[in-house]
Image (cartoon, rainbow, N blue to C red):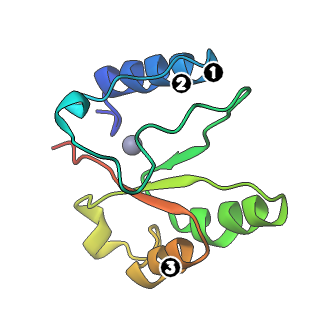
Amino acid sequence: MSRCSTKNILAAAAIMACISAGIALPAKGLANLPDDPAGILRKPVPDKLVVLTFDDSPASHATIVAPLLKAMGFGGTFYVCDFDSFKTRKDWYMTFRQMKALADAGFEIGNHTKVV
Ligand SMILES: [Zn+2]
């Protein structure tokens, strides 16, 4: 079984299509929010936006991908996970210290759903 469900991949593709087309995505429940103090939810989507996301938190994301992105001036979001093998194969996955270092370097860290 794939770690990324088809449903999630299709949802991500739909979001990417909307973002690349410059379509503002309605946030569920956003109309009920009295304010957006961080100015995040109602920012206009820039033209020609590309969103770089990385999945499953292999160690190479911290050792290879992030340094390359940083050197080229790109940001990115790393979706980290808690697979069963995370506890036994620490050499395969980023450590919490590496995740913290990515966040400190300005990358976004997101939660990856667990597929059982
Ligand atoms: Zn995944």
Residue in the foreground of this view, choosing between 12 and 26:
26
In the picture as drawn, the residue positioned furthest to the bottom comes out as 97
- The Cα atoms of the two marked residues, 2 and 1, are separated by 6 Å
**Quadrant containing the C terminus in the rendered view:** top left
Q: Kindly indicate the quadrant of the structure image that contains residue 30.
A: top left
- 92 above or below 80? below
x then y, percent, for residue 83: 26, 58
- The Cα atoms of the two marked residues, 3 and 1, are separated by 30 Å
Give the quarter the ligand 1 occupies: top left
Residue at x 55%, y 72% (from the top left corner): 102
- 109 above or below 76? below
On the image, numbered disc 1 is attached to which residue?
A: 20
On the image, numbered disc 2 is attached to which residue?
A: 16
Lower sequence index among marks 2 and 3: 2
Amino acid marked by disc 1? Ser
On the image, numbered disc 3 is attached to which residue?
A: 98
Residue at x 32%, y 58% (from the top left corner): 81
